[in-house]
Image (spheres, helix red, strand yellow):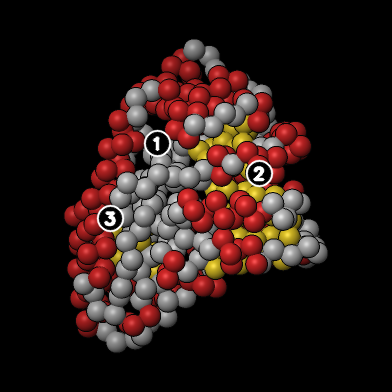
Amino acid sequence: MLKTVPSFGRIGEENAFAVLARATELAQSGRDVINLGIGQPDFRTPDHIVAAAEKALRDGHHGYTPANGILPLREAVCSDLARRLGVEVDPGSVLIVPGGKVTMFMAILMFGEPGADILYPDPGFPIYRSMIEFTGARPVPVPIREVNDFAFSAEETLSLITPQTRLLILNSPANPTGGVTPREEIDKLVAGLANHPDVAVMSDEIYGQMTYDGLEHRSLLAYPEIRDRLILLDGWSKTYAMTGWRMGYSVWPKPLYDLARKLAVNSYSCVNAAAQYAGIAALEGPQDAVREMVEEFDRRRAVVVEGLNGLPGISCRTPKGAFYAFPNVTETGWPAKKLASTLLEDAGVAVIGGPDFGILGEGYIRLSYANSTENIRRAIDRMGEFLSAKAA
């Protein structure tokens, strides 16, 4: 019998992909399934980005690139960060990676080991906890509470730091809640981190361009006092509807950069060459498609929130960012995961149970409004019929 090392038994997964697989299976059997589970834009990658990849292939960019990414792309990332956020970043601190998860993987591997604590948002992206447990470190949930509009509390976060804390993971705008942490709360957190100079910070800002109601995204890069221990996670997947291209980037403090580059060499060598040229076109080309997509998500957000708040036993705060709603389903009487699975099997609506995002996710489900307004309305109608007809 083959025997793997114990750490592999601790690897979790992202249940959204399991729900996607089941929804696809049902659809292939002839069922009409509306998928509000998977977190990817339902838009095409803009044509000028696709054309740049095609041109790169025709021009012969078929080989390896530097492990940290081609210099023109890293320079384009820096120019984009300066334009959007007003921050200066050296191309020598930018690492191009095949998707945002790679940055999580690297950062958590660097700081996670038995005896170490890593703080992460709960509810939050499930891969955070999965990777922390894989390394043998102790996962310490940072509560993300509905009463705070799903923003993290600086005071509560800081109170969880101990001498064993190695890494703090932050995410705003957030998956799964759609929460956006206000600037004043981030200011308080950064000020408090001065008392914990040995704690690294990984800021997941993959949804940074998706905020609503006039809110501006506040990047942790804007705080020079923590730049020497800050790891930024960002990329193209959500902003440019490029999930399948597997394109992300990270910004590293100087002491960690070469370690991350070596991890790249040891694991994936480099990112797809043609995709990197597409990444340049995305950042340097017209941004109209990004604005139009976010405006459409905003319109759908209103439909989702109004519809959910009209369902029996469900209440939903208005998300401030990303493209997720995280309604409270406690009053339905259904356990969240059971409700999610039954909605898929009986009503043909795919959503994700809140516990798939952490201990504090019980009582909630996640809906992605990266689907058409027509499908969103149909899904909410089906949910209403289901809840009216079936007791828990």
- Under circle 3, the secondary element is helix
* Mark 1 or 2: the one toward you: 2
**Residue at which label 1 appears:** 240
Residue extending farthest to the top is 59
Identify which amino acid the numbered label 3 is placed on.
Answer: Arg
**Residue at which label 2 appears:** 226
Name the N-terminal-most of marks 1 and 3: 1
Please state which of residues 83 and 292 is positioned toward the viewer in this rendering.
83
Asked whether the viewer can see residue 291, the reply is yes
Q: Residue at x 60, y 38 (%)?
A: 250
- Under circle 2, the secondary element is helix
Find residue 371 and report its horizontal and vertical position in percent: 29, 52
Find residue 93 and report its horizontal and vertical position in percent: 66, 31
Identify which amino acid the numbered label 1 is placed on.
Answer: Tyr
Q: Residue at x 43, y 22 (%)?
A: 284
Q: Residues within 10 Å of mark 3 (few under 14, many from 20)?
A: many
In the picture, the quarter occupied by the C terminus is bottom left
Q: Residue at x 25, y 45 (%)?
A: 296
Q: Is residue 245 left or right of residue 170?
A: left
Q: Is residue 326 left or right of residue 69?
A: left
In the picture, the quarter occupied by the N terminus is bottom right
Residue 265 falls in which quadrant of the image? top right
Name the N-terminal-most of marks 3 and 2: 2
Name the N-terminal-most of marks 1 and 2: 2
Q: Is residue 184 left or right of residue 368?
A: right
